[in-house]
Amino acid sequence: MAKKLCKLAKKLELKEIAAAARSGDFICSKCGRTASDKKSLCRPVGVEEL
Ligand SMILES: [Zn+2]
């Protein structure tokens, strides 16, 4: 996946972001987006590290 989900987050509804967060293993420390693939985030941090 080449595109950063972070850029897409601006267009997403909050509900969709929340839904993604439930299954996300990583969260972007810069913009708060979550994803199961850290490569999709610009500054990924494991959710269990927070
Ligand atoms: Zn980001």
Image (cartoon, grey):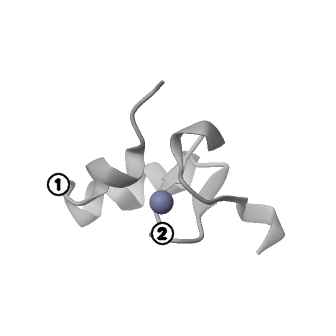
Left or right of 22 on screen, residue 13: left
- The one of 40 and 21 positioned closer to us in this rendering: 40
Identity of the residue drawn at 52% across and 40% down: 40
| Mark 1 beta carbon near ligand 1 (under 8 Å) | no
Q: Residues within 10 Å of mark 2 (few under 14, many from 20)?
A: some
Question: Where is mark 2, residue-wise?
Answer: 32
Disc 1 residue type? Lys
Ligand 1 has an atom within 8 Å of the beta carbon of the residue at disc 2: yes
Q: Nearer the viewer, residue 34 or 30?
A: 30
Tell me what residue is drawn at x 80 percent, y 64 percent: 48
Place of residue 23 in the rendered image (x, y in percent of width and height, measured from the top left) = 56, 46
Q: Secondary structure at mark 1?
A: loop
| Residue visible at 42% across and 42% down in the picture | 4
Q: Report the side of 32 relative to 11 (left or right).
A: right
Q: Which residue is depicted at the point 76% across and 75% down?
A: 50
Q: Which mark is residue 28?
A: none
Q: Position of residue 7 (x, y in %)?
A: 31, 52
Q: Quadrant of residue 28?
A: bottom right
Circle 2/circle 1 CB separation < 8 Å: no
Q: CA distance from mark 2 to mark 1?
A: 14 Å
Tell me which numbered mark, 2 or 1, is placed earlier along the sequence. 1
User: Which residue is more in the foreground, 28 or 36?
Assistant: 28
Whether residue 40 is visible here, answered yes or no, is: yes
22 versus 36 height, above or below: below
Q: As drawn, is 18 to the left or to the right of 39?
A: left
Q: Position of residue 47 (x, y in %)?
A: 71, 63
Q: Which residue is mark 1?
A: 11
